[in-house]
Image (tube, rainbow, N blue to C red):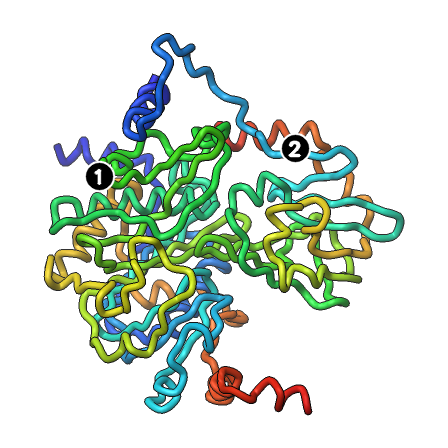
Amino acid sequence: MGLLRQSEKLGLPLMNLVRFKGMPILDQLNLEEKLLRTTSDNWCIVNDGANAPTVVMGVSGKPAELLELESVIGDNVPVIKRFTGGGTVIVDEGTIFVTLICNKDAVPKVQPYPRSIMSWSGKLYDEVFQGIGDFQLRENGKQKLSIRNCFETLPSPPHYLFASAMQPIFQCSKSWCFVLLPDYVFGNRKFGGNAQSITKDRWIHHTSFLWDYEDRNMTYLKLPSRAPEYRSARDHTEFVCRMREYLQRSAFIDKTIKALDNYFMVQPATPADVNSCQVAKFAHSTRLLSKQELEDACSSTKPGTIAQSASI
Amino acid sequence: MALRIWASSTANALGLSVASKAPALAPLSRCFSSVLDGLKYAKSHEWVKHEGSVALVGITDHAQDHLGEVVFVELPEVGAAVSQGGSFANIESVKATSDVNSPVSGEVVEVNDKLGEAPGLVNTSPYEDGWMIKVKPSNPSELESLMGPKDYTKFCEEEDAAH
């Protein structure tokens, strides 16, 4: 059986697995972007907890719209704008990060486009969480497809489409199809969020998992204007849940690596291995917002600000 | 066969009627997006229209369809240098940022400011109102290495069929 397993894996692409614990999220994001843009290897980065509470926004996030800025500034919470798209999260030592960096041809049938990548990652994590609690994939957003090309776009029958007959993940009218882009939930509470960045030949898909969190930290985030229907206007503490209530930290990481084994020849890499393949100079696009930027954003939300600006 | 079974199951799950003697689902034409004559196309799904001393650049209908709803476009500054195959812009859609690569080398002489307020123009009008940059080409012969409409259509079909 061992020999058979080995021979089956011979055709699989290599993936370097590097594990950190408590790496600051800014350092992690900078490393990810550098590996995406300056190497040609496949990588899985697991960071078991960030070192301190930090707000992380997507590339186009607006602090005034997404954050309770007076609290964020008053409590000196760092705010980062990352190089990938998507929404805003607050991370800390209770957050587990899993990042996949792949060449565009690494996974068969996966195209370097958002919904193709997320369809595959949904399947990957479905394998990780199947049978745990009342795990589901729930709609985060919709992708409109013409009925004529919906079959070309979706992967070959993914089993998770039928995981819940009551909540179809695929909706059709006479002329349009919508593929729903999944959140990871137990019941109707979200425990993981993801984002992507896609270059000409590679892509990155990173996910932050709420193994645990401080309720207080969630109060730094406003209710986003764009939210999935199943959220039903719940605030953060009612919308999210802790993975620790469902499985052990090490079990989750182990199951994720095991699921990756179905698609890649996973080989451990050390931080020294990572350093040795990096170029010396690289201009990161992830950045820490300055206190001045946050204060300016906070001022812009206050009455009288517009008139004041106009007079200048 | 697998495709037909899936389609039938999907229809049943969603309460759609399925003809009892539906014809076999032959492989559908894979590229339904529009491809315009008069443009040249890159394998990374950008188009270029050479008009005199300036080249107009944007992403194709195929690309915008696969990317999804565009919510943010980051364009270069006027005066910036671009190189063929190199990234010059960033598009955010559906929780993802995607590079946009220039089909030609040269200098950016104009950018589409409308995309700041209306990034969705890339989806609704990828070949007209959704244009991204105008470039003064430094090497017009680079256009010869790009695909014409028929070759690009075939390229899209082959690419989608492979996935």
Name the spot of residue A137 as percent of width and height, x first. Answer: 26, 47
Please state the chain letter of the residue tagged with numbered disc 1 in the rendered image.
A
Q: What residue is disc 2 on?
A: B152
Please, what is the three-letter code of the amino acid marked with disc 1?
Ser
Between B95 and B120, which is closer to the camera in this rendering?
Answer: B120
Name the spot of residue B47 as percent of width and height, x first. Answer: 69, 44
Q: How crowded is the residue under tag 1: few (<14 C-alpha within 10 Å), some, or many (20+)?
A: few
Between marks 2 and 1 in the image, the one whose residue lies nearer the viewer: 1
Name the spot of residue A56 as percent of width and height, x first. Answer: 38, 72
* Image quadrant occupied by the N terminus of chain A: top left
**What is the quadrant of residue A164 in the picture?**
top left
Q: Where residue A164 is drawn, which disc sits there?
A: 1
Q: Residue at x 82, y 56 (%)?
A: B136
* Image quadrant occupied by the C terminus of chain A: bottom right
Q: Residue at x 13, y 56 (%)?
A: A251
Secondary structure state at the residue bearing disc 2: helix
Which residue appears farthest toward the top when viewing the image?
B21
Q: How crowded is the residue under tag 2: few (<14 C-alpha within 10 Å), some, or many (20+)?
A: many
Between A130 and B87, which is closer to the camera in this rendering?
Answer: A130
Name the spot of residue A100 as percent of width and height, x first. Answer: 35, 54
In space, the residues marked 2 and 1 are separated at their CA atoms by 39 Å
**What is the quadrant of residue A49 in the picture?**
bottom left
Q: Are marks 2 and 1 on the same chain?
A: no
Secondary structure state at the residue bearing disc 1: loop
**What is the quadrant of residue A30 in the picture?**
bottom left
Between B83 and A287, which is closer to the camera in this rendering?
Answer: A287
Would residue B132 appear left or right of B27 to someone viewing this image?
right
Q: Is residue A277 visible to us here? A: no
Please, what is the three-letter code of the amino acid marked with disc 2?
Tyr
